[in-house]
Image (cartoon, helix red, strand yellow):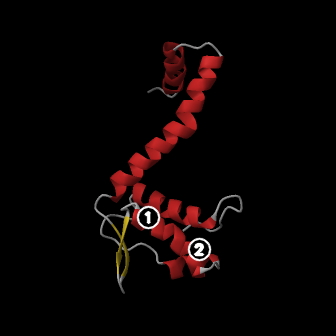
Amino acid sequence: MKKELDENKPIFLQIKEQIEDSIIDGSLNSGERAPSTNEFAKFYQINPATAGKGINELVSEGILLKKRGVGMFVTEEAKGIVIEKRKQTFYENYLLPMKREAQKLEMDRQELINMLNREDEANGN
């Protein structure tokens, strides 16, 4: 868990994203128990309902599975679901605005690709 929460973003979203990040980076694998609402509440000194809101969203998305009396567990499909969701968000938040800006600057597709490749070339890739 991160030491501090960002005041500019809803807490339940930050908790949701922390679990997603842990799934993506492999620190939380399928079948493993995710931190509970009470664990998040105690660690961050927040209301358990706030933590529960983020966790419940992950349950509704099929990323976590509730086992009554035992806890929340990462589903087999979780990593794929999170990656696909994050790819869509990346597309909407970064690629579409980049493409719109490139069009304003009268850049064609090849010029944009060349700019993307420039970073790889600078790093020797």
- Residue 10 disc label: none
Q: Position of residue 29 (x, y in %)?
A: 34, 64
The reply, left or right, for residue 95 in relation to residue 25 is: right
> Helix or strand or loop: what does disc 2 sit on?
helix
Q: Please determine whether, in this image, residue 12 is positioned above or below residue 39.
A: above
At 34% from the left and 51% from the top, the residue drawn is: 80
Q: Please determine whether, in this image, residue 25 is positioned above or below residue 28.
A: above
Q: Is residue 46 visible?
A: yes
Check disc 2 and give the amino acid type. Thr
- Residue 58 disc label: 1
Depth check, front residue: 118 or 91: 91
Q: Is residue 25 visible?
A: no
Q: Please determine whether, in this image, residue 13 is positioned above or below residue 72.
A: above
The reply, left or right, for residue 18 in relation to residue 72 is: right
Asked where in the image residue 125 lies, by quadrant, the reply is: top left
Depth check, front residue: 26 or 15: 15
Q: Position of residue 17 (x, y in %)?
A: 52, 59
Which residue lies under the disc numbered 2?
50
Q: Position of residue 5 (x, y in %)?
A: 65, 65
Asked where in the image residue 33 lies, by quadrant, the reply is: bottom left
At 53% from the left and 19% from the top, the residue drawn is: 112
Check disc 1 and give the amino acid type. Leu
> Helix or strand or loop: what does disc 1 sit on?
helix
Could you give the CA–CA distance between mark 2 and mark 1, rounded to whole angstroms? 13 Å
2 or 1: tag closer to the N-terminus: 2
How many tags in the picture?
A: 2
